Amino acid sequence: MKRALTIASVLLCLAGAPAFAQSVLAKADTLFQAGSFREAEAAYLDALRGEPSNAHAALQLARLELYRNELGAAKRDYAAAARLPGADNARIQRDLATIAQREAVANAGASVSLPAGGLAIPMLALDPLPLFSVTVNGHLGHFLLDTGAPDLVVDSDFAKEIGLQTTALGEGIFAGGKRAQIARATVAEFSLGSVVMHDLDADVSPTRPVQLFDTPVDGIIGTVFLEHFLSTIDYPRHRLVLRPRAQSHAFEAALPQTAVLANLYLVGDHFLFSHGTINDLRGQTLLLDSGLAGGGFTADKPTLDAAHIALDTEHAERGMGGGGAVQAIPFVVDKLCVGVACQRNIRGLFTPEGSAMGIFPFTVGGTVSHQFLERYAVTFDFDAMRVALVP
């Protein structure tokens, strides 16, 4: 949603506005924490009209622009917010770094030569997750596709085998809230089909212990790689289609009537969110993380209870996530929707040892994953900030 007024113009035009009522800001924060981003934005604008010097309201508006990937507006409004008393300058600098990273990704993608109709790269396997043949610095590897991952992830042993230079990065949070050490590297050349990318950032952590295929998983293709393009994970046709991001408008205009379009939000460097329904729970903020092998949904216990979802504790198992072994208790969602794209009887997994949902500053209803997404050709449009689901 575009705004006629930027934060900067509000500060200029309304400097003499009456004192701000704190209840308006409290309402805005409540809406934001619930994931009601459009309503929160309107309330934060009301807050600024009442108190143009309120740094918190100004920063939250810039943050919502960043979620919508409106990078020019976000940069201007972060700069305006930084001039206000009490502004959180450390957070502003972190978010400006995120903006610079996203701009660099978009520019790098624009420099890649692609056919007019895009490039279709076949999957080696669809289940339990999409698998692709790649080359990393000239070495053949097998990478799965997971929108829950950042840019690229290279298996620790594979990185040693191909001579990647790594730098320790600290701990990462994985399935079940498990933590594991990760490192960072730069991949000089990465090839997927005929797409060749240079100097890509990569996390280095164990992926081969996650034994999903007969062949070892040498790494993961994540969301930041997809951000370079107008990216379609075409599950029914077993392929990944990469188009130039500049084709956003033409692509959406050509969508069939069966397509469902839903708003998309990009949080941090790679977390994709939309809104949907879990059984009778409407307006839920849902993480689109395609990497849950064997399931289509996961959520924390309060959401499961509110949606009247019963856990099948008799069939609990232990699986392997990026941070180690995790207990998984199955359940079934009667109805799960992203926007108005709905599926019935979606298998879910609950991890009682914890989750990573607490890292977000808003309530996450749950994670939509493979078994739901595989019914569609799923396109992530990082310019229009919409996800298209075509059955």
Image (cartoon, grey):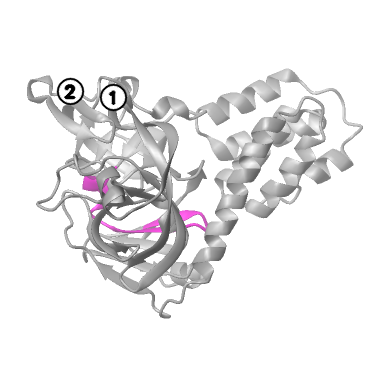
- Reply yes or no: does residue 144 show up in magenta: no
**Quadrant assignment for the C terminus:** bottom left
Quarter-wise, where is residue 14 in the image?
top right
How packed mark 1 is, by other alpha carbons closer than 10 Å (few <14, some 14-19, many 20 or more), is many
The alpha-carbon separation of the residues under discs 1 and 2 comes to 9 Å
Q: Nearer the viewer, residue 157 or 196?
A: 157
In the image, residue 58 lies at what x, y percent? 72, 35
In the image, residue 232 lies at what x, y percent? 35, 62
* Disc number placed over residue 48 in the picture, else none: none
Q: Which residues are magenta?
A: 369-388
Amino acid carrying label 1: it is Leu
Quarter-wise, where is residue 174 in the image?
top left
In the image, residue 336 lies at what x, y percent? 28, 40
Residue sitting at 72 percent across and 36 percent down? 45
The furthest residue to the bottom:
116
How packed mark 2 is, by other alpha carbons closer than 10 Å (few <14, some 14-19, many 20 or more), is some
Residue identifier under label 2: 311
- Left or right of 304, for residue 40: right
Q: Nearer the viewer, residue 107 or 294?
A: 107
Quarter-wise, where is residue 171 in the image?
top left
Amino acid carrying label 2: it is Leu
Q: Secondary structure at mark 1?
A: helix
Can the viewer see residue 290 in this picture?
A: yes
Q: Are marks 1 and 2 in contact (CB under 8 Å)?
A: yes
The furthest residue to the right:
16
Residue identifier under label 1: 304
- Left or right of 366, for residue 67: right
Q: Secondary structure at mark 2?
A: loop
Residue sitting at 65 percent across and 44 percent down? 96
